[in-house]
Image (cartoon, helix red, strand yellow):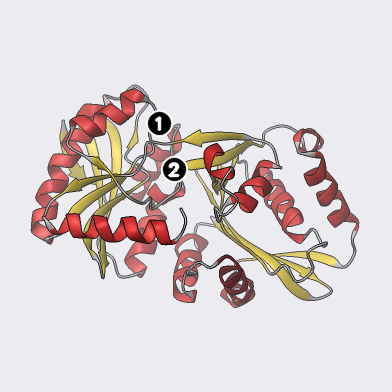
């Protein structure tokens, strides 16, 4: 098996299109996004005669340390030898880590969380990370049924909220890819961040995300206006026949107005028009975390689950130590996790 760099966008995207487990964080355009953010990236392919796996690698430089990140990957061809493939990639990444002088390698796998897949990382010398980078527990919805069937499968209160939103002439959903409309999202997003006490992505981050996917018609901003005022917003990414609810915000200024529900319904209908088979609501809290009423994702999880669907749990984020500085970084991340009540 040989690890080679992939520079051809079509080769990368066609391979991902045929894969079962994937998210847009391994798309060609997500690599472009990270380059726009000033990060170095590498696109690698594992070849065993034919291409059997792809791996996006991002060099992350943070105040606490520097590391190589594999975002929700590698993406492996059905039936591929997962352990052998990951071992070959790791060998290449260790060489790269020494060249780039990073402290550790962090894998956020796209492998289903089971004993076999966990053992792969344990056997290769990885250690479970104290934090995650991308969702390890997600909520997805099969959107191939007709619209009425999708509505009937939803929680009663969710279905009611959508229908009330449709009837309310004071609510308007605007769809756009214009960067000027991103400012409305950002305004509501900052309100959401203050309410839930988290650090929001910068406007530069949001703009770069929009521009990275816009040229391929893979992104859409949805702004919900109530009597002319934007009170909820979302950014949806459409990639490889899947729609991803990646960014969302609501002001809660009018809590009885079901704008957020209507945005999701419009996004689901848009995804169906684009030929998507799955709507990915992105991260949710685990069942045991729902019992912790102070967990910041409880309300969001209940909201997403109301649309019906199913959960997927991936192998936890895993780290491979390169330098002894990693242990200090690990302590810092554990303390930060405790502070955030995660």
Horizontal side of residue 304 vs 54, given as left or right: right
**Front position in the image: 120 or 57:** 120
Q: Is residue 84 visible?
A: yes
Q: Quadrant of residue 85?
A: top left
* Label 1 close to label 2 by CB (< 8 Å): yes
Residue hosting label 2: 136
Q: Position of residue 130 (x, y in %)?
A: 32, 50
Q: Secondary structure at mark 2?
A: loop
Q: Residues within 10 Å of mark 2 (few under 14, many from 20)?
A: many
- Measured in 3D between alpha carbons, the distance from the residue under mark 1 to the one under mark 2, in whole angstroms, is 9 Å
Q: Look at the picture and state if 309 lies above or below 235.
A: above
Image quarter in which the N terminus is found: top left
Q: Look at the picture and state if 202 lies above or below 50.
A: below
**Front position in the image: 284 or 14:** 284
Q: Position of residue 210 (x, y in %)?
A: 51, 66
Q: Residue at x 61, y 47 (%)?
A: 301
Residue hosting label 1: 113
């Amino acid at each position: 098996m040989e690890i080679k760099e992939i520079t051809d966008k079509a080769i990368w995207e066609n391979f991902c299109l045929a894969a079962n487990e994937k998210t847009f964080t391994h798309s060609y355009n997500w690599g472009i996004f990270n380059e726009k953010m000033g990060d170095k990236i590498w696109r690698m392919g594992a070849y065993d005669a034919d291409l059997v796996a792809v791996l996006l690698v991002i060099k992350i430089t943070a105040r606490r340390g520097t590391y190589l990140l594999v975002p929700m990957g590698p993406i492996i061809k059905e039936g591929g030898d997962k352990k052998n493939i990951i071992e070959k990639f790791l060998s290449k990444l260790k060489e790269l880590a020494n060249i780039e002088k990073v402290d550790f390698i962090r894998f956020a796998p796209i492998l289903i969380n089971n004993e076999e897949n966990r053992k792969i990382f344990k056997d290769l010398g990885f250690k479970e990370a104290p934090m995650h980078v991308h969702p390890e527990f997600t909520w997805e919805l099969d959107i191939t049924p007709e619209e009425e069937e999708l509505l009937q499968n939803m929680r009663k209160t969710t279905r009611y909220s959508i229908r009330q939103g449709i009837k309310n002439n004071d609510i308007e959903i605007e769809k756009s890819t214009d960067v000027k409309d991103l400012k409305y999202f950002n305004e509501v997003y900052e309100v959401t961040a203050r309410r839930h006490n988290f650090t929001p992505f910068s406007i530069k981050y949001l703009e770069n995300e929009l521009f990275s996917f816009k040229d391929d018609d893979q992104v859409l901003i949805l702004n919900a206006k109530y009597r002319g005022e934007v009170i909820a917003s979302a950014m949806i990414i459409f990639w490889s026949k899947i729609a991803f609810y990646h960014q969302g915000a609501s002001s809660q200024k009018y809590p009885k107005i079901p704008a957020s529900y209507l945005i999701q319904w419009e996004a689901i209908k848009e995804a169906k028009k684009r030929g998507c088979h799955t709507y990915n609501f992105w991260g949710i809290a685990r069942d045991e975390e729902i019992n912790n009423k102070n967990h910041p994702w409880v309300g969001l999880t209940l909201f997403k689950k109301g649309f019906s669907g199913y959960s997927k749990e991936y192998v936890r984020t895993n780290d491979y130590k390169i330098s002894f500085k990693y242990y200090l970084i690990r302590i810092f991340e554990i303390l930060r996790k405790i502070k955030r009540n995660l």
